[in-house]
Amino acid sequence: MPKKDNKEDREDATTLKRHHAQYSPERIFDLSGHPEIKGINFEKKADTDALIKSFSTTGFQATNLARAIEIVNTMRKEKATIILSFTSNMISSGVRDIITYLVKHKKVDAIVTAAGGIEEDIIKSLKPFVLGDFYVPGKVLFDKGINRTGNIFVPNDRFAYFEKFIEPILDDMHAEQQKTGHIHSTSELIRLLGEHVTNKESYLYWASRHKIPVFCPGITDGSLGDLIFFQKQRHRTFHLDISQDMYDIVTFCLNAERCGAIILGSGIAKHFTLNANIFRGGLDYAVYITTADEFDGSDSGARPDEAVTWGKIKPNALSVKVFVDATIAFPLLVAGTFAKE
């Protein structure tokens, strides 16, 4: 029986043919001008510059990282305002020291992070975290009063030091609110905390002294939130103004002639950074470093191209997503950009 001619089938066949034409043998095999795949040559004396340069032709995520380094160097060359966004586990890890370096030397213009990115910077300025193991049973650590973040151990006593540090500052804030009527914004609270830190290994120490704004849209998510709860329990008239930070970061982005973001990890810090740039028509540059994927439709795993559809990144922006643990990729990125002077 002859097959019935179907208009939709003909249209689908035409579309498929047009799509395949984009990948015709002539197009696929015309490779003139394509760089040869080549890795680092350890027969020669290796150095950081040679290693980073080799990434561009290595392929896979090494090439994406090379692209990220290129974009960050372009941001800097074009005098862009740079926002550094990161999840709290970056501060749990040794990446904190790199972030402190960037803030100390005023190489970034603003920071967006989660609550742990605030409290753990302060805690580590009081007493360090230690290297542990991913596979120690949770019950064993719980019985010993040790918290685990991946393979990093955080003893409970660290939070006792943190509470002792925070409570007088919150009391002073409440007293000022009662006296003047001024309600502190989240970033004002963070600046006050930084002013009280005396350890120069803290990025909040340097941010407060260089007047680099630090935004934290999820300030109550963590130990700091617990202490805010206790403060509110003692003083029902204690308040924090979260709306001011939304106003401040949007104004900050609107005032930037060019704006770029380096986003480590994802979550609330990533989205707060991207969303603020909608008001200026999107970021001009965006570098994501994350292990999150987009298959579940989350903003955390979304590629820069999805952000273009929302107006968070400009269609013609320079952007890249590097699928790598940031504790590996970010030190290399900084070595190939900010630390080259």
Image (cartoon, grey):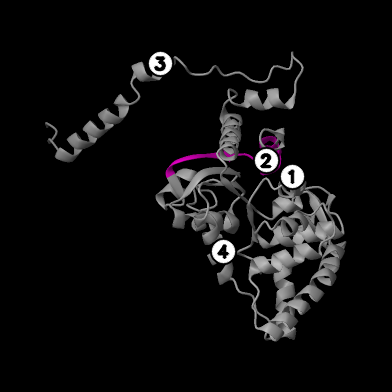
Closer mark to the observer between disc 4 and disc 1: 4
- Mark 4 and mark 1 lie on one chain; the one further toward the N terminus is 1
Q: CA distance from mark 2 to mark 3?
A: 35 Å
Report the quarter where the C terminus lies: top right
Mark 2 neighbour density, 10 Å: few (under 14) some (14–19) many (20 or more): many
x and y percent of residue 118 in the render? 72, 60
6 vs 60, nearest the viewer = 60
For discs 2 and 1, the disc positioned in front in the rendered view: 1
Instruction: Find disc 1 in the rendering and name its residue.
Output: 98
Name the residue carrying label 4: 248
In terms of sequence position, does the residue under pointer 4 or pointer 2 come before the other?
Answer: 4
Give, as a three-letter code, the residue at label 3. Phe
Q: Is residue 290 left or right of residue 191?
A: left
Vertical order, 9 against 160 (above or below): above
Q: Height in image: 26 above or below 254? A: above
Of residue 3 and residue 175, the one placed in the foreground of this image is 175
Residue 220 image offset from top left, x and y in percent: 66, 69
Cα distance between the residues tagged 2 and 1: 9 Å
Crowding near pointer 3: few (<14 within 10 Å), some, many (20+)? few
CA distance for labels 3 and 1: 43 Å
The CA span between labels 4 and 2 is 27 Å
Q: Which mark is residue 29?
A: 3
Left or right: residue 247 compared with residue 14: right
> What secondary structure is found at the residue carrying circle 3?
helix
| Residue type marked 1 | Ile
Q: Earlier in the sequence, mark 2 or mark 3?
A: 3
Q: Which residues are magenta?
A: 315-334
Q: Secondary structure at mark 1?
A: helix
The answer to whether mark 2 and mark 1 are in CB contact below 8 A is yes
On the image, the x and y values in percent for residue 151 come to 78, 48
Q: Which residue is mark 2?
A: 330
